[in-house]
Image: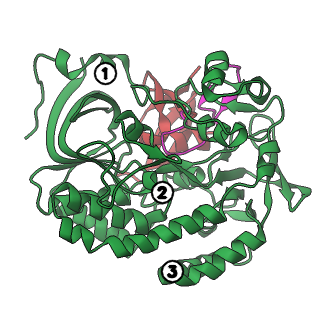
Amino acid sequence: MPSEVTVRVNGVTVSVPAGATVAVAMVIAGQPCRTSVTGEVRGPLCGMGICFECRATVNGLPHSRTCQLLCEPDMEVKMDE
Amino acid sequence: MNNYSRERFDVLVVGGGPAGIAAAVRAAETAARVGIVDEDVTTGGQIWRGGPSGGKHSSEASRWLEQLKKAGVIELCGKRVFHYPEAGILMAEGLNDIWELSYRNLVLATGARERFLPFPGWTLQNVMGAGGLQALVKSGLPIRGKRVVVAGSGPLLLAVASYLRKHGAEIPLICEQASWSQLARFATKLIRFPEKIRQGLQLRRDIAGIPLAASSWPVAAHGKGTLEAAIISRTGKSETVKCDYLACGFHLVPNSELPILLGCRTRNGYVQVNDFQQTTVDGVLCAGEPTGIGGVDLALVEGQIAGLAATGRTSEALALFSKRERFRRFARLLDETFCLCSELRTLPSGDTLICRCEDVPYSRLREHTSWRAAKLHTRCGMGPCQGRICGPATQFLFKWNPDSVRPPVFPARVAHLAAQPQSIPEVTGEIQ
């Protein structure tokens, strides 16, 4: 098993340790996960799938809770609008 | 249509933390089919979370996790229970799959979450829960060389500070809202709990040299989109601490939404159980944090009692009662020590968002007199988290009582909501 996985977050390529969650990739990339209803950018808060702040579009699937999703090679992650 | 599967259990456990694992292991000693469902990618819960930087498990954690593997328990990870269509059935969803889980006995071990209190700037990126940041670091977030202010309340703060420092973080300050006199009283009473003293002394060694401030809390977080500094009120004096992360959680609140949806009665927010961990709903038991915030030791004992009671082994369960009583005394001590001081109610300013899902500011909430009125008029608590974050906050800020819980207990995909058990004529994937 490779020790690192490469994914794209809002167009930025980022390498993360194998087994890392998508939320981790987004924080490493310095990218927000979503835009709030009044336009604030947000990142993870609870880290355990409760707060829904880290939801993003993963491989085309919107509203994915990225803190409970592992990175897979070449995953395409985009901020939820 | 996504994959639809049916599973039938003698004992089904919801929640894969220590309480759930203990319940499943003990139940599987005599029950034929025991299942455990958890929304995370592996079992272990928050406290025994694995991941790339999860580190080595304690011997106790390894022992339980190994027993779970050996016990023949069916593990359904990455599945979230979202609906209770009828007695004896729960619906769960994964990314592309729906599960109809029927059970004879159900053990709810849904754990706890951090309590978040709003202050100006708390919605900035890199302001996170204390346990929240720890979870991300365990899941692979590099923390070496980062400055992290750890703040809030409860023993979790020390554990998080210790963990983060071991992984290379610099911790300029730990802020605990409780006062020194409360903490001193806690320390004196710890003498009755030898195993906790050991843990406490170890923690003290681990965090040696990190300044710990009592009666202290963040009053604001500053930064442009992302956090740059925390403003701390330290025993009444304000100081600015530059940091990369502010890890802030005010002790824990129970995840009682699913128990309430099932009709379990609660008292002071906790699920009411009898000596055998049975709730007020027939065939539904509850163990761990939802019955009272007591930590891993209490969770393991309650879980075992629930697992034994669910399989009719009352005399074996009885043998664990005195142990449970001791850990319950510890839970009460936690409650007394880390109860929130009233000054924390003054943290939000008018434009501080209280509901992060619907972006409802404090100024729009304070004119209302109940949670329900606030929901109806402002949409507070009506976003995807369904009030899990702002509910406990408004309960503290305004003394509002939470509402009833309605299905789905978590937002679910429309296709999954439509897939009620009655409406599915064919079973596509029964697993035996």
Q: Colour of chain A?
A: red
**Which residue is under mark 1?**
B416
Q: Nearer the viewer, residue A37 or B19?
A: B19
Q: Position of residue B100 (x, y in %)?
A: 21, 31
**Few, some or many residues within 10 Å of mark 3 (<14, 14–19, 20+):** few
Residue A56: percent from left, percent from top: 52, 28
* Earlier-in-chain disc, 1 versus 3: 3
Front residue of this view, candidates B179 and B66: B179
Residue B240 placement (x, y as % from top left): 88, 54
Mark 3 falls on what kind of element?
loop
Residue at mark 1 to residue at mark 3: CA–CA distance: 47 Å
Read off the magenta span: A30-52
Residue at (53% x, 82% y) in the render: B192
Residue in the picture at 61% in, 47% down: B115
| Parent chain of label 1 | B
The residue that disc 2 covers is: B292
Identify the mark nearer the N-term, 2 or 1: 2
At label 1, the amino acid type is: His
